[in-house]
Image (cartoon, rainbow, N blue to C red):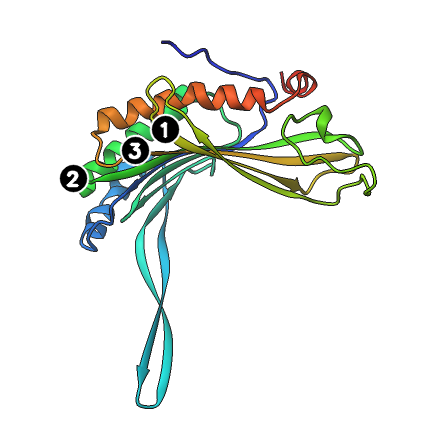
Amino acid sequence: MATQPLRFDNAPIREAIIAIQVHDLPESSLEELRLLPEKVKDSYPQKTELNQAQFVGQIGPQGPTASAQQRVIGLQFQSADSKQLFQTRLNGFSFHRLAPYESWVPFRSEAFRLWGLYREAVGPVQTTNFTVRYINAIVVPAPGKLEDYLKVYPQIPPELPQLINNYLARLELPLEEDEGTGTGVLTMTQTLLPSEPGTASILLDNMFLYPALGVTDDVLWKRIDAVQAVKNRIFVSSLTAEMLRRIA
C-alpha cells in the first residue's frame, strides 16, 4: 500500500537517521573503508576517523594495573555544508540528514546509495538490526501548558509547583507488525532544550528499532521503507491539533 507523504512548512525535524547494525567485521575491513573517500569526495569532502576507547586491566605481582587505548573502528564523511553525513564502521553504517529536512524519498534514496558503497567496500555482512530515528525540536510559547501541544507529557499533581525548569521522559513501547516492518521497539525521549526568551523548545526524539538478523538487502530496505508510515502516524498522534497547526 502506498504511503502518503507527510510534509510541514515549519517541520521541526533537526536530524533524521537511518542506521544499520552488522556483526563485527575484521580489522582488515578498515583498509577497504579507507578507499571510500575517493568515491564520495565530490559530495562528502570532509573525512574523520571514528575511534573507540578500550580499557585493559591486568593483575600482576605488583597488583592490578589499567591502561586505555584507542582503536579506529571506522570513518565519518561529511558534506561541505555539514547538512549530511554518513558513518562506515566495523559494526555498521548510518546516514544522517540535518535540518532542513526535505522529505523521506531523498533521505531514504541517499542512505540506500551510500549503504551500497559500504557493502561494496566490506563485502558480505550479516545484519542484526536497523533503526529509523527522527529528532525534533518543538518550539512553543512559554510559559504555557505542555498538554496544549503534546499528547505525551508528564502530568503534575495540582499540589506541586506547575512551572517546569526541565524534565526527562523516556518511554519504550512495543511495535507490532505493520505493513511489513516486523515487530520492533519505539523509544520516545522528551526533554527541554535551550530556547529564546518567551519560548520553550521541547526535544521530541522518536527511535524505531527493528531486528533484521541476516536478512537480505532487498528485505532490509523493504522493511526500512515500511517504517515511513509508522513514524508518520506516531508523530502526528503525539501532537495536539494546535501544535499541528503551528507547524503546518
Location of the C terminus by quadrant is: top right
Relative depth, front residue between 74 and 239: 239
Please tell me how crowded label 2 is: few (under 14), some (14-19), or many (20+) other residues with Cα within 10 Å: few
Seen in the image, is 38 located left or right of residue 243? Answer: left
Residue carrying label 1: 183
**Is residue 43 among what the camera can see?**
no
User: Distance from label 3 to label 2 (Cα)?
Assistant: 16 Å
Picture quarter containing residue 163? Answer: top right
Seen in the image, is 124 located left or right of residue 243? Answer: left
Please tell me how crowded label 1 is: few (under 14), some (14-19), or many (20+) other residues with Cα within 10 Å: few
Number of numbered discs visible in the structure rendering: 3
Location of the N terminus by quadrant is: top left
Residue carrying label 2: 124
Q: Are marks 3 and 2 in contact (CB under 8 Å)?
A: no
Give the image location of residue 10, x and y in percent: 61, 21
The kind of residue tagged 2 is: Pro
The kind of residue tagged 3 is: Leu
**Is residue 142 among what the camera can see?**
yes
Relative depth, front residue between 117 and 168: 168
Position above or below: 59 against 131:
below
User: Distance from label 1 to label 3 (Cα)?
Assistant: 26 Å
Residue 114 numbered tag: 3
Give the mark nearest the N terminus, 1 or 3.
3
Seen in the image, is 228 located left or right of residue 74? Answer: right
The kind of residue tagged 1 is: Thr
User: Distance from label 1 to label 2 (Cα)?
Assistant: 25 Å
Picture quarter containing residue 45? Answer: top left
Q: Secondary structure at mark 1?
A: loop
Please tell me how crowded label 3 is: few (under 14), some (14-19), or many (20+) other residues with Cα within 10 Å: some
